[in-house]
Amino acid sequence: MKYQLTNLSLDLGEEARPFEPMLAALLGGSPGDYRCPRLERRSLDARHKGNIRFLVNISFESARVFEGISLPPGTKLEPGPASVSFEVAPVTRKPRVVVVGTGPAGTFCALRLLDYGIQPILLERGPDMSERVRQVNALWNQGILDPEANSQFGEGGAGTFSDGKLTTRTGHPAIRFVLETFVRFGADPRILYLAKPHVGTDVIRKCSVLIRKEAQRRGAEYRFKTKLVDFREAGAIRAAVTDRGEEIPCDALVLAPGHSARDTFGMLQNHGVAMRQKAFAMGVRIEHPQDLIDRAQYGPSFGHPSLAPADYKLVCNLSNSRAAYSFCMCPGGEVIQCASEAGGLVVNGMSNAKRDSGFSNSGLVAKVNTSDFASEDLLAGMHLQRKWEQACFRAAGECYGAPAMSVRDFLDARATGLLPRTSFRPFAVPADLTTCLPEFVLAQLREALPEFENKIRGFGSREAILLAIESRTSSPIQLLRGDDGQSISHPGLYPCGEGAGFAGGITSAAVDGIRVAEWIARGAGAPTFEPFEKRIKSGDVATDY
């Protein structure tokens, strides 16, 4: 019979020992009584700095009968987790589907459509991975921006140049499908049990290319450097129009363009596609030496070989429904230039699989409400983002560096021009950040930073640097869709992923892509896929951070 031991507390180092003797010591019998032990989940409990421990769930098979077993407080012995098959039968009626965007939403939508025998055409405005990497390096090393090939646009989407974290709060059963897919294409199998799975930008690039090649082998068609500029309709979507002058007939047009496809949003607005303004967040990247964060978070356990570079999650709830918080924290990562429009700057965080840069960074952002837009224009949030991205470009001397300021100077309201060390490329530019952000955002950051210093010693020290602007935290709009996944105003149009306002990171975007594929397959006669159906709701907005 299969069992699972849940919430078992282990000392640092104990997690690396064989499980069979551990199970025998806890449950009785000999190590040979326990077969196929597998780690199902592992998280770090660092609430008590003097006693940092791992909490694990271990599944196993055993013929023993467990009665009257005394277990440590909080630990339970339960029936083992049931395995779930994601296989489905191909549909007999196969609609023509065009998927816009090859980020996680578009990619996983395509993969799931292929499971049903539906072979989509994928449009990607940017280039394939090899060319995209060259153009991104040109921006980071030489300050040369290509508006169609950068950290936002190109094969793999924006998540390709990010921390590659797969943490999500969605709780959707398709998460396992996403994790297993990444492992199948080269990700570390540990992501299947880590509470905070992380792939790394170096690995996720390789995964993206291998996934694409497999999708092509199964019949998907990829068209790089091809941008959606319009669509044709006659009661429903009939064709996608590209910047190459093509009209591609389709029965379903999946819109998964990412949160930075501003020209696409403008085209949708001109067509009267139903959408609404959406709150987002805006702020800066804060960076510290990784050792500073490790010492603060791990205390006496600092330096233990079982401990990965430390992360953190900080929230400061302010007045008037405001909140400042850390966002997309990158242990062992670097701050990167993510501009996608000429004359505007955007920063973000990224890390490789090893997380060994020696630096720690996080978004430090404040809530931007729709009332802050002060406009009925549905794209007012987008215009607000652009306004301050352009202000940062001017503050950096009209180049693709990043305006920066030490935390101490920011809090003391003085611009000394002295900057702590930073990982940012191509270079940081000493600047007065009060010219780079709206006053209501600055006020929230000023109020939150001292509180964060109380939680993490050294957070506001002279080794901490702020770089602007972190403005692409999420989409400033949400396209409205019904219970069948289609736009409520344009049948045949399927809003999808982060750009459409239904996700907030790699995993939730991938899951939303799967949801859309399920809706399309159901419309083509596929039966309901029960393992995913129980949590598929049209109005959900998922976030990963």
Image (tube, grey):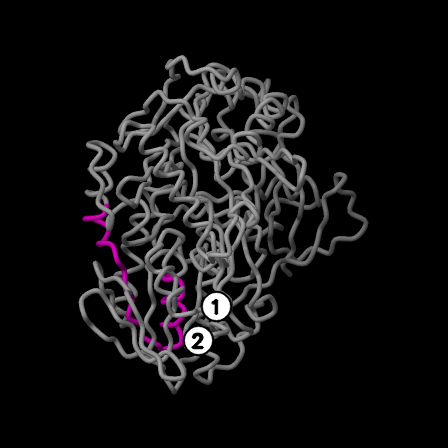
> Does the magenta-highlighted stretch encompass residue 113?
yes
Q: Does residue 255 appear left or right of residue 305 in this picture?
A: left
Decide: is 386 above or below 296: below
Q: Position of residue 212 (x, y in %)?
A: 28, 60
Q: Quadrant of the N terminus?
A: bottom right
Residue 482 found in image quarter: bottom right
Pointer 2 with pointer 1, Cβ within 8 A: yes
Decide: is 396 above or below 526: above
Identify the residue under disc 2.
490
> Does the magenta-highlighted stretch encompass residue 121?
yes
Q: Report the front residue among 494 and 70.
A: 494
Please identify the residue farthest to the front as the structure is shown. 375
- Range of magenta residues: 106-132
Please identify the residue farthest to the bottom as the structure is shown. 92
Q: Position of residue 539 (x, y in %)?
A: 57, 65
Element type at mark 2: loop
Element type at mark 1: loop
Which label is found at residue 274? 1
Q: Report the front residue among 374 and 93.
A: 374
Residue occupying image coordinates x 74% and y 53%: 66
Considering only order in the chain, which callout, 1 or 2, is on the residue closer to the N terminus? 1
Q: Position of residue 513 (x, y in %)?
A: 44, 64
Disc 2 to disc 1, how far (Cα)?
8 Å
Three-letter code for the amino acid on which mark 2 is drawn: His
Three-letter code for the amino acid on which mark 1 is drawn: Ala
Which label is found at residue 362? none
